[in-house]
Amino acid sequence: MKKLSFENIDDLAIGCAIMGSGGGGDVELPLMMAKMEMERSGPVHLINFSELKPDDVIMPIGFMGAPSAEVEKLHSGKEFEIMLDYVEKTLKKKVTVLMPFEIGGGNGILPIAEAAKLGLPVLDADTMGRAFPEAQMSSCNMLGACASPGFITDCLGNTTVIYAANSQVLEKIGRQVVVAMGSVASFGFFPLNPIEAEKCTFHKSLSKAIAIGKVVRESREGGNDPINALLTLCKGVKIGSGKITDIDRAISRGFLYGAVSMQNKTEKLELEFQNEYLLAKRDGKIVATTPDIIMLLEQQTGSPINSQQLQYGLKVHLVALPAPPLWTTSAGLQLVGPRHFGYETDYHPISNLKHAHHPAGNFS
C-alpha cells in the first residue's frame, strides 16, 4: 500500500496529461479537487491487486463527453457520490475500491479526489492504458468483462442506469444521455470483482503516470530538457516542431472534433482529433496514428497541450509514445486503430519513423 503525497499528485497530473494524447479532460480542476480533499480528509492509499479482498467491488469512473464542454460546465463535486449511491442500490453491494476508467487527462486524477472524500483506496490500474474517446475502447471490453450496468450522473444529480447488450451499445446509449445532459457527465462502467480487475485491466498505470510526471518535473527543476527525458523514459519519438497556425474545432455528437496545423521554416505538421489526437501528418504524409500516444508539448516547458487548450501562435513539439501492446494486436487495432475512426489507412507504428532511436531528432 502506498500513500499518495501532494508531490505524487503533481507528478500524476503531468503524466496523465501526457498519456491523455490530447483528451481525457483538463487536469487542473481535478488536481485542485484532489488536493483539497486530501487536505480535508488525509492521504489516499494506492493499492495493488494483492491487497484486494475477495468481496471487493471495484468501480472504474471518469467524466464522459466533450473536453471543451467540461471547461464551460464545471463539476458540482457531488456527481460521483450520487452515482455511487445508485451503483450500490443497483448492485446491492458497497463499492469498496475506485480506479480511473482511463489514465489519460483529468480522468486519471478524479478517482483520487473521490477516494479522499469517501475514504476509499484507489487501485493502481485503468482500463485503457492511455485515453480514448469511446467507452468500448477498454481492456475490459477486449478481455471479456461485462460493462453493464452502466451509470451516468450530471452536475444536477440527474442519473441514468443503463443495461446494454454489450459495451458498444452502452457507449451509443450513454453518449446520447451525456449529450442530453449538456455534453459532459460523470460515469461508471464495468463494475469489477478482484478476479475480473486483475485479468481485464492495465496494471500499475497510475505508477507509470507518476514516473512520467516525475522525470518531466525533475528535468525542469534541474534545468535539463524535459522533452528528451520524457522520450528517453518512454522510448518515444519527436516528429517535429512548429508554431500553431490554424485550428478547426467543433463539438458534435458529444465529442470535440477538429484539426490543428503547425508550421516551421521547412515543414508543415498536421494533427486530427476526436477528443484525443488520432493522426499526425508531416508535409501531407501520415507519420503517426492511433493507438500510439500522439501529443503536443509546449517547447519551453514541456507542458502537455490537450485538444481544448490549442491556441494560435503556440510553439510546440509534436511527439509520439508507443501504444500499450494490447492495442497493437489485430483485435486491438480493430477497436482503436485508424480505420475505426474513418481514416483510410492502416496503423503507422512510430518504430517505423527514421532515426526513431534518437528521441530528440526532428526526422526532417
Image (cartoon, rainbow, N blue to C red):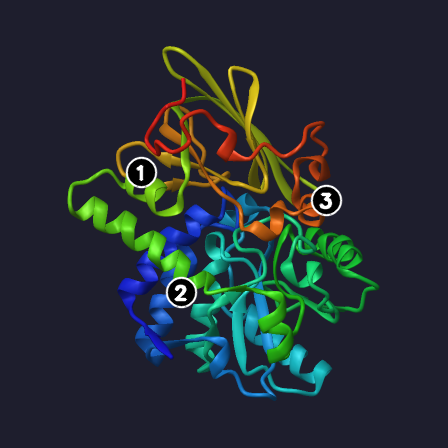
Instruction: State the residue at coordinates (52%, 52%).
Output: 130
In primary-sequence order, the first of circles 3 and 1 is 1
For the C terminus, the quadrant is top left
Q: Which residue carries the number 3 mark?
A: 334
Amino acid tagged 3: Gln
Give coordinates of residue 61: x percent, y percent. Answer: 57, 66
Q: Is residue 5 visible?
A: yes
Amino acid tagged 2: Met
Q: Which residue carries the number 2 mark?
A: 33
Residue 227's tag is 1
Looking at the image, do the residues carrying marks 2 and 1 touch, with CB atoms under 8 Å apart? no
In primary-sequence order, the first of circles 2 and 3 is 2
Instruction: State the residue at coordinates (41%, 58%).
Output: 208
Quick check: 204 above or below 307? below
How far separated are the C-alphas under marks 2 and 1? 28 Å
214 displayed left or right of 21:
left
Q: Secondary structure at mark 2?
A: helix
Instruction: State the residue at coordinates (65%, 47%).
Output: 329
Give coordinates of residue 100: x percent, y percent. Answer: 52, 64
In primary-sequence order, the first of circles 2 and 1 is 2
Quick check: 4 above or below 108? below
Quick check: 177 above or below 237? below
